[in-house]
Amino acid sequence: MNTSDIIIMITILAYMGMMVVIGAVFSKKNSSVGDFYLGGRKLGPIVTAMSAEASDMSSWLLMGLPGVAYLTGGAEAGWTAIGLAIGTYLNWLIVAKRLRVYSQKCSAITIPDFISNRYRDSKKILMGITALIILIFFVPYTASGFSACGKLFSSLFGWDYHAAMIISAVIIIAYTCTGGFLAASFTDLIQSIVMTLALISIVIFGINSAGGFDNVIDNAKDISGYFSLSHIHNTETGGSDKYSALTIASLLAWGLGYFGMPHILLRFMAIEDRNKIKTSRRIASVWVVISMAIAIFIGFIGNKLTAIGKIDQLDAADSERVVIKLAQYMSEHHTGLAVIAGLVFAGILACTMSTSDSQLLAASSSMSENILKGVFGVKLSDKQSMMVARGVLLIIAILGVILAWDKDSSVFRVVSFAWAGFGATFGPVMLTALFWKRSNKYGAIAGLISGAVMVFAWKFGISKLGGAFAIYELLPAFITATVFIIAVSLLTPAPEKEVTEEFDSVNKEIRA
């Protein structure tokens, strides 16, 4: 191991050690399960904004998005980013405040709690279905994060992929198990800062190494379909393929996923002052737009540096390592830059850890609070609940490690499927629960089930037909779930008076 590698290693270890310390500090603030899972609804506007977006972006920001841009150009990455930017803003604008008020009104500390309590589902059918869906889609989502960590250390130090992945998972589990939601949220704030510094460092160094901004753009323009939003570069033929309006719509549909992301919605429920949500919205929206634009441009920079022989050519299986390759080149260029390279690698870890911790908490709460206590009625004291919560979190993490065992799995593709799963199942249900007084529990059940079924059916069946059917599964599944909610709600009895009165009281409180 040379001097640069040692400096990088020290930087990464210092960062990971800091995360564990934060977990230990915040463990003293968890006096109840509500504190562990929702932080006692005490988050400030800045922490709320940055923890929501850091937990949203995941390793996708520094690996998946630049990798897609590096390989095929701006179309797929660009339209996806535009959809996400719009979705981020709308989620903060129309969902955040209403969910904060409504969730407190019906005494909910998890998303399954909210949906079940909103419709007064005494049989806990809604709670069971929502909790199960969270487990189904969060385990592979978490696995993608562990996989990203394994790829990082494997590429950087030549470590065994599986050993690196397990070590990374242990660190994430350690601070999440001890500190709970507050630790996850405050580490997310720090991780968002690290991610930002990593993005800026790579762009500045990359542009300089490529000979200037104009050289990067000229290289992109010279590749067929690369510097375009209407065409995509075909790596097999060297030519380009046209993007249809339907394909663009399906990529923009990524934005619909925000309405159903449990780990993001929980931040809305946890903010201390609902009147400061506007501040959070502005911070979050600006950060998301800038960070995704930079991430895509990093893909362009990587392609240029490949063209001039400064980094190796990356194929489809390795394209997600483009940031890793750029940071390695940075550290080799000058020993003094090794610290900055270490910061970049810490940024990749930050992306992964900020999402994995939130996902582990959401999945853990679904099992311990909603399935064991809610559905099966297991009686647990606060101390026992905390122990069960941490135990379940550990089990889910182990399952994530098992699913991430295949080192050739794509971070972008796994996240894409899990995102569609949450967006299509929870998105329509959350929007109708918050804004449609006539919606009822039967419609919600129909929406959850139909959305989940359609995601799998479209991904593994219908999309294989090609043509107009080869679109992102989130869009058809979201539409299907919405139709089922509306139709079933109208065909079944109206909600009880208690439910409609609570809906009216929430409206009145929000307008006040």
Image (cartoon, grey):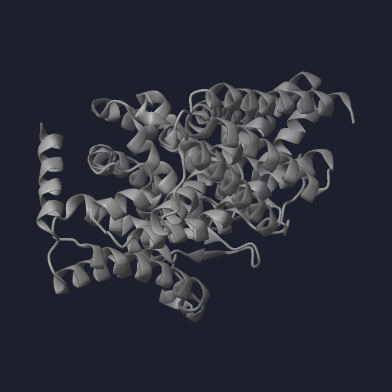
Q: Is residue 158 left or right of residue 250?
A: right
Q: Is residue 371 left or right of residue 26?
A: left
Q: Residue at x 64, y 23 (%)?
A: 18
Instruction: Residue 217 in the image: state x and y as whole percent.
Output: 56, 41
Instruction: Residue 222 in the image: state x and y as whole percent.
Output: 59, 50
Instruction: Residue 451 in the image: state x and y as whole percent.
Output: 37, 67
Compared with 183, 297 (above or below) is below
Residue with the most extreme right position: 1
From where the camera sits, is residue 211 visible? no
Residue with the most extreme top position: 336
The tally of labels here is: 0
Q: Quadrant of the C terminus?
A: top left
Q: Quadrant of residue 166?
A: top right
Q: Is residue 191 left or right of residue 402?
A: left
From where the camera sits, is residue 31 visible? yes
Residue with the most extreme bottom position: 465
Q: Nearer the viewer, residue 70 or 462?
A: 462
Q: Is residue 165 left or right of residue 290?
A: right
Q: Residue at x 34, y 29 (%)?
A: 280
Q: Nearer the viewer, residue 369 or 422?
A: 369
Q: Quadrant of residue 59?
A: top right
Q: Nearer the viewer, residue 128 or 258?
A: 128
